[in-house]
Amino acid sequence: MVSVSREAWKEMGLTAGEYERIKELLGREPNYVETGMFAVMWSEHCSYKNSKAVLRLFPTKGPRVLQGPGENAGIVDIGDGQAVVFKVESHNHPSAIEPFQGAATGVGGIVRDVFTMGARPIALLNSLRFGNPRNPRVRYLVGGVVSGISFYGNCLGIPTVAGEVFFHDSYEGNPLVNAMCVGLIQTDRIARGAAAGVGNPVMVVGAKTGRDGIHGATFASEELSDASEDRRPSVQVGDPFMEKLLLEACLELIDAGLVVGMQDMGAAGLTSSSSEMASRAGTGMEIDVALVPRREPGMTPYEVMLSESQERMLVVPKQGCEDQVRAIFSKWGLDAVVVGRVTGDGQLRILENGQVVADIPALALTEHCPVYNPVWREPAYVATAHAFDPASLPAPADLGAVLLEILSDPTVASKEWVYRQYDYKVQINTVVPPGSDAAVLRIKGTNKGLAVTIDCNGRYCYLDPYTGGAIAVAEAARNLVCTGAEPLAVTDCLNFGNPEKPEIFWQFRRAVEGMSEACRVLETPVVSGNVSFYNETNGQAVLPTPVVGMVGLLPDISKRATLSFKQEGDVIVLLGETFPELGGSQYLQTIHGLTTGKPPALNLIRERAVQQATLAAIRQGLVNSAHDLSEGGLGVALAECAINGGMGAKVVLPGEVDPLTAIFSESQSRILLTVSPGNLVALENLCHQHGVPYAVLGTVEGDRLVAVDQRGQRVLDLAVTEMTKRWREAIPCLIA
């Protein structure tokens, strides 16, 4: 056997220690194909070798959890024999190099993760991060990413119903593109990715295999640099029409009861799907790559095993059912070819025309990867940032002008320019569309609904990753509660820089600790997720961005709430307390260009109480509108309620803090409610019952947003039409 050169295995991304470990596991030198298979499976993207130990901190079990981490997607019981299946993943590096295809194939991959479980996808969400949109390169990335998402989702006929777009200079060269998919399934139809049953056939189904995406997993496990454009061939090319056919064929296959196991060929392609399916079942697998349908001539076994061509699945049907499987896929115009069989020896054996080209214990690729515990230490910038006092800055003379400036900031301004490109009404389930705190979808044939959201504030996580991680969970839950939904469970996409840098790994570890504590207190276990490291460009990391996707349940969809003011004379009530907390705020970022200070504190017990009081009020029919306070604080929350409702308000600011702080503080655990005057006492009783402080601010009235301080002096007076214009037109002007 010809040994692999040091230059070759280093180029594949392996370290000297890892290569020695491979030799120990095999008892010999690996050949070129085997080395490539180990390289992709032991990459950070596939193995989680730097994050696995920390991820064990997450709570993953709960009374509703049917499937937690370890499968293609998480599953949560929603009663009546139904379950919701969901997951979020990143496609950051491919989107930085080729934004359209990078984003499009990110959508395709996450959809396959969901229907692989037997679920029909009903919704897509996305969390996007970019640099300054005044930069032409950033505008190119924004346009390509949004177009790629809309193209793939619209062609599939899956509505994109919610998301977020956040801008900060740290994402200039390394955008974040996180895609989430939600599906519905009957609990007796759940499929899993295990290659059980010795002797069962192994079939490759779907699209033909090409050379696109080879070593995509290792590309995702390294920092970007000026040379990254040379990696453009690593970006896969997607075909949503092929994916639609594949989706329907796979669901039909599962409904027919023909499937033992099924796995998407995502990162690392045939190598990951075959090794993971065998490992889960404790079996082995034998595959002849010469039988794999190809769209390019002359492909080597190495290329076939590492290709990340899209719209492909690995299926293990019941023995003797091969013809039925072929018939189903033929009906949908797709390949379904037997390429091997399940074995009982635990080996992943790869052949080419009957000749062995790789022979590896399946567990060596999946379970025996080295697990690292990187050194971590608090960065020096944290103490400096925390020492900063926002009160040291000159106070603005015109708070109305400040609010208008914040409303037109790309992060805060209307995202209609994005979601109007998405078909968010297809499947006719969307009852609360994009633009509210969370989207709400009906579950046909029932009175129930699902609320879905995705959230994170990277500034908070940069300044205090523990608190920022906890806030990401709390705010996602708060978004769901504001629709009337009970938060059920979390999927996460943890986007960080290079974990080999102690300061970056400290950010990661502390964020996971904060998220874990919030998940425990709010009873929202983590059921699926993704880690995306090495989000750096030329050594500069993005803001730590642990994105939280969350799903909630509405027992009665008719009792749902939205953020818009509904009628004149409604009473405006603020639940929670406002503190002098401007650190990490949108005010500091927009007006002073600063990401500094201490982010707002989070009391999880208070958070839970505010959420429970709000949920009870909505379900009792007391609430006409509900909106959580986040970026921009009370000022932006009031403006958004007014803009979306087309009516104004007159309020008296809370007296515990100065007007600037009252309007722009981002204190947590606060929700803005409106109620009819006759329901105010009942709401106040609920607040007392749950131990929630509240303040009656004023009423919905007129066509202006007017705020006065405790002395009756007017500190805000803005026409709703003027706010609407600034809020709605800000981004289209920048990206046109």
Image (tube, rainbow, N blue to C red):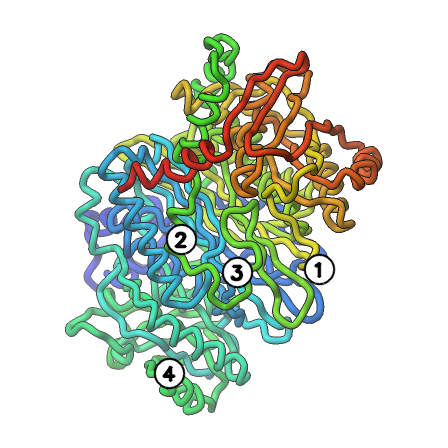
Q: Earlier in the sequence, mark 3 or mark 1?
A: 3
Q: Nearer the viewer, residue 118 or 440?
A: 440
Q: Spot the residue most to the left.
A: 298
State the CA–CA distance, disc 2 to disc 3: 20 Å
Residue 130, above or below 117: above
Mark 2 vs mark 1: in front? 2
Query: What amino acid type should be assigned to the residue bearing mark 3?
Result: Val
Query: Of helix, strand and loop, which one carries label 2?
Result: loop
Mark seen at residue 277: none
Q: Secondary structure at mark 4?
A: loop
Give whichever of discs 4 and 2 has the lower sequence position: 4
What residue is drawn where x is 65% and y is 72%?
Answer: 445
Q: Nearer the viewer, residue 376 or 167?
A: 167
**Residue 568 in picture, x, y percent from top left:** 66, 39
Crowdedness near tag 2: few (<14), some (14–19) or many (≥20) residues, C-alpha within 10 Å? few
Q: Which residue is mark 3?
A: 182
Say if residue 14 shows up in the picture: no
Q: CA distance from mark 4 to mark 2?
A: 31 Å
Check contact, mark 4 vs mark 3: CB within 8 A. no
Q: Is residue 517 visible?
A: yes
The quarter of the displayed image where residue 406 is located? top left
- Front-lying residue, 700 or 104: 700
Q: Amino acid at mark 2?
A: Arg
List the residue tagged with mark 2.
420
Mark earlier in primary sequence (1, 4): 4
CB within 8 Å, label 3 to label 1: no
Mark 3 neighbour density, 10 Å: few (under 14) some (14–19) many (20 or more)? many
Query: Where is 320 relative to 429, above or below?
Result: below
**Residue occupied by mark 1:** 556
Q: Which mark is residue 332?
A: 4
Quick one: SS at disc 3?
A: strand
